[in-house]
Amino acid sequence: MVQAKTWILKKHFDGFPEHSNFELRVEELPEPKDGELLLEAVFLSVDPYMRPFSRVRMKEGDMMIGTQVAKVIQSNNPTFPVGTHAVSRCGWRTHTVCDGSGLIPIMPDWPQDVSLSLALGAIGMPGLTALYGIEEVLGLQRGETLLVNAAAGAVGSVVGQIAKIKGCKVVGSAGSDAKVAFLKELGFDHAFNYKTVGSLEEELKKASPDGYDCYFDNVGGLFSSIALQQMKNLGRIAVCGSISLYNDTTPQTGPYPYLTMIFKQLKMEGFLQSRWEHKHAESFKRLMAWLKEGRLQSREHITKGFENMPAAFMGILKGENIGKAIVTVC
């Protein structure tokens, strides 16, 4: 019998998450039946989306949602032999018995010198989100100017790099001087610490006096209300996240940007990367090619130990990570 450790949402979050919202449990797993396999988590992902999704997708007592890179350690399923790896959406748990449905096999030609953890980052959901936001939602064109906030995070850092690959000017906002330094290493044309600038409006004007063609929004709230005023006519906005709102106990209200959107004829679209699932296989190849060519870099914020999942999750909501936040089981 294999024992699985799992993290449970003991109580729904009220404001910022606390350790008391989580409970670690242990369960005995049955032997895999015919067609089933046993997975062991190697890398687990913590992502901001888990905060708002927990309210609409989970009830108290449910296991925390999330993805992981897992290794097949026992198998009665020929599609997933022992020793292979896959991306699984089985949540915050160390071991899982499943029939293989819903598993995403790791690319068969995954380079040996590239960590499999990147399947949760630049060559995974965050990378796809960045790519589809730029190409499918914004339709970013060479020579245009792009603004991205939370730019040192898992999605934002890839957004800026893809925009540079496409020959665009990139302005990025982040929440610490260390993150700003990271963005400059990635080749952003202008990067600033939104916490220390005297005026966000003036900083955005200084970075791009003519305004912005495209805006990739991960933050929402007041930042976006100010950023929309800096958009060019017929500008496009991709709404990927709104982390500034996730932990509010009272919903924020106003200002309302509708007149700006009308007069500037702006296009704003929310999206999830799953809309383009039919393109995933080819998109993974493109992202990996950029990585191998040195045109796409990936930084990870590693937390060791499955017992530290809640701390790692709360850390990303505080902005402690640069790049993709990953938890290693060992």
Image (cartoon, rainbow, N blue to C red):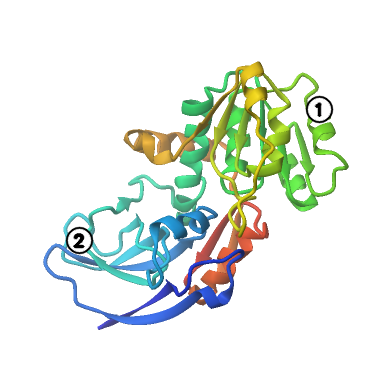
Which residue is rendered at x = 56% and y = 66% of the image? 14
Image spot of residue 5 (x, y percent): 39, 77
- Report the side of 50 relative to 154 (left or right): left
Which residue is rendered at x = 49% and y = 68% of the image? 12
11 shown above or below 172: below
67 shown above or below 64: above
Which residue is rendered at x = 66% and y = 47% of the image? 152
Image spot of residue 121 (x, y percent): 50, 50
**Callout 1 amino acid:** Lys
**Callout 2 amino acid:** Asp
- Residue in front for this viewpoint, 128 or 247: 247
Question: Which quadrant, please, contains the N terminus?
Answer: bottom left
Alpha carbon of mark 1 to alpha carbon of mark 2: how far?
A: 54 Å
Image spot of residue 148 (x, y percent): 65, 36
- Report the side of 292 relative to 201 (left or right): left
Image spot of residue 76 (x, y percent): 16, 65
Q: Quadrant of residue 241?
A: top right
Q: Nearer the viewer, mark 1 or mark 2?
A: 1
Dot 2 corresponds to which residue? 99
Which residue is rendered at x = 69% and y = 37% of the image? 255
Badge 1 density bin: few <14, some 14–19, many ≥20, Cα 10 Å: some
Whether tag 1 and tag 2 are in contact, CB under 8 A, the answer is no
230 shown above or below 325: above
Q: Is residue 148 visible?
A: yes
Dot 1 corresponds to which residue? 205
Marked residue nearer the N-terminal end (1 or 2):
2
Toward the left, the furthest residue is 34
